[in-house]
Image (cartoon, rainbow, N blue to C red):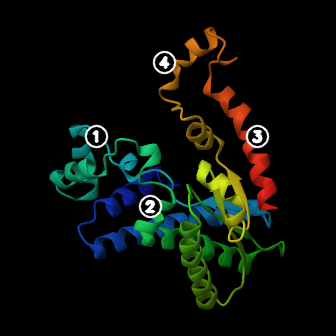
Amino acid sequence: MFFEGGRIVAMREMILAADEADRKAALAKLLVMQREDITELFRIMDGLPVTVRLLDPPLHEFIPHTEAEMASVAKAAGVPFERVRRRATELREANPMLGHRGCRLAITYPEICEMQARAIFEAAAEVGRTSQSGRTPVAEVMVPLVATLQELDLLKRVIEKTAQAVQTEQGVAFNYHIGTMIELPRAALQAGKLAGLAEFFSFGTNDLTQTTYGLSRDDAGSFLPEYKEKGIVEQDGLAQRQKAGAPDTSKSVSGKGS
């Protein structure tokens, strides 16, 4: 939803914005695109739940790192080359998998969360109002990379406030649920508390496996074959660790959340 066509251009404009006015202008473009995408999903699903995850990737993934690519982005976004290079440096992280991504982006840039929530709810209102089958959309807003109850509580209030605003503006009621991803051991350990706020869980077994085992999918191949050869593990792939560990965690968390 963010990397295709004009979407990534608008996303880069938002990231590279010099001030709040420019950032809001870029977000207004993204709102229209997101709303169109989600409206189509609601129409296709025809009353079945549609789960939309809030922005998860770190912002540096939207900015290229070679000077030639930066120059191209600067031209497309209508900003100075130096601003692109400076922003790329600012966004660079030593460990992006555990860095400024997921719900952390929504907390530090609440306007992004508000834009996505508004796109979801405006789409739900539009499809609910024009549905020919009589079936109304069910929106599920999923908050990624939650580690603490406070993170989910803060963002749930932002999402609910946006839902109420859209319902008032549109004069249309719609069904929605707010849930979270379980992809960090901390979230799994306090699943019972998170269940008091979340209406559903979704398991991110990729990140959950990596953070539980302390393995990186990008680096584990350098030593897991040796582990297999010495009988420490039966398989040398991270996917096997995922199959072994994630189901047990999922069962435990599901029990706490029920």
For residue 244, above or below residue 39 = above
Residue of label 3: 247
Mark 2 vs mark 1: in front: 2
Residue on which the image places disc 2: 105
Instruction: Give me the C-alpha separation between circle 3 and circle 2.
Output: 28 Å
Callout 3–callout 4 Cβ contact below 8 Å: no
Q: How far is the residue under mark 2 from the one under mark 1?
A: 21 Å
| Marks 4 & 2, CB-CB < 8 Å contact | no
Q: Nearer the viewer, mark 4 or mark 1?
A: 4
Q: Earlier in the sequence, mark 4 or mark 1?
A: 1
Q: Which mark is residue 120?
A: none
Say what amino acid the circle numbered 1 marks.
His
- Numbered label attached to residue 222: 4
Residue 258, image x and y in percent? Answer: 82, 62
Q: Where is mark 1, residue-wise?
A: 65
Amino acid found under the numbered disc labelled 2: Leu
Residue drawn at point x = 66 percent, y = 52 percent: 188
Which element is circle 4 on?
A: helix
Amino acid carrying mark 3 in the image: Pro
Q: How far, Cα to Cα, is label 4 from label 1? A: 26 Å
Would you identify the image quadrant in which residue 37 lies?
bottom right
x 44%, y 71%: residue: 110
Would you say residue 171 is visible in this rendering? yes
